Amino acid sequence: MRHGKKFNHLGRKTAHRSAMLSNMASSLIIHKRINTTVAKAKALRKFIEPILTKSKTDDTNSRRVVFSYLQDKESVTELFNNIAGKIANRPGGYTRIIKTGARLGDNAEMCMMELVDFNELLLGDESVGKAKTRRSRRGGKSQKEEAPKAEVAEVQEEIAEEVTSGNNDEEVEAKSEEGEEPQSDSSEESPEEEKK
């Protein structure tokens, strides 16, 4: 009977299993995303989460402990230099398992395992979700909504004034180039009309 035995041996001896999890953890750290079976991903999650937590404190002891699990200098360097800074504020739950269906050959349940803080698409959706405000049942608009509309109206009026004054300046310049004297906008009459 296997009462209470939750550990998945993955059909491997201890040395083979630990080497496989170490290699998968190194690949996940370097590439930020790997494709594997769901059973291996769940075993890897238990293996790598404590390693990621250990990487938050960057000292010699934690580097040596992490290296004893990973046995790969490149992945340890990547973990402490790049990943540790991004996961510093996250209190656990550093990985995500997304199921991708069954494998064609043996119908094994496949998944994609990734580091949560390195998926730009899902991080972008979260930032958009936070920007939304709650709707009120009251019909009134807040002052924040009215202020931009007033500013837009003022800017449109300024642009309209500049356009009209800009057209007059262009007409004056064009007539001065042709040799004609520009006409003033005032109600002064020409000297010929005064004589009559």
Image: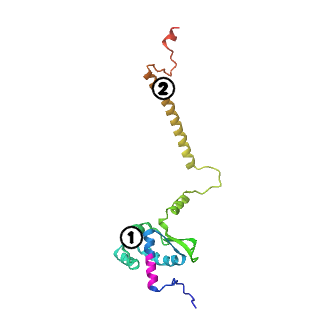
145, above or below 74, in the image: above
Task: Please tell me which of labels 2 and 1 falls first in the chain.
Answer: 1
Q: Name the residue rendered at 47%, 28% in the picture.
A: 170
Residue 61 is situated, as x and y percent measured from the top left of the image, at: 35, 77
In the rendered image, which quarter contains the N terminus? Answer: bottom right
Of residue 57 and residue 52, the one placed in the foreground of this image is 52
Describe residue 30's horizontal placement relative to residue 104 as left or right.
left
What secondary structure do most residues of the magenta stretch adopt? helix
Labelled disc at residue 80: 1
Q: Find the distance from the CA under tag 2 to the CA under tag 1.
A: 68 Å
- In which image quadrant can residue 57 be found? bottom left
Describe residue 156's horizontal placement relative to residue 59 as left or right.
right
> Which residue ends up furthest to the left in the rendered image?
60
How crowded pointer 1 is (Cα within 10 Å; few <14, some 14-19, many 20+) is rated as: many
33, above or below 106, in the image: above
Q: Name the residue rendered at 44%, 68% in the picture.
A: 31
Q: Name the residue rendered at 47%, 65% in the picture.
A: 118
- In which image quadrant can residue 73 be found? bottom left
> Element at badge 2?
helix
Name the colour scheme: rainbow
> Which residue ends up furthest to the bottom in the rendered image?
1
Q: Which residue is mark 2?
A: 171
Q: Name the residue rendered at 49%, 77% in the picture.
A: 44
Magenta range: 15-23
Residue 97 is situated, as x and y percent measured from the top left of the image, at: 53, 72
- In which image quadrant can residue 66 be found? bottom left
Residue 123 is situated, as x and y percent measured from the top left of the image, at: 51, 62
Of residue 52 and residue 190, the one placed in the foreground of this image is 52
Residue 16 is covered by the magenta coloring: yes
Residue 128 is situated, as x and y percent measured from the top left of the image, at: 54, 58
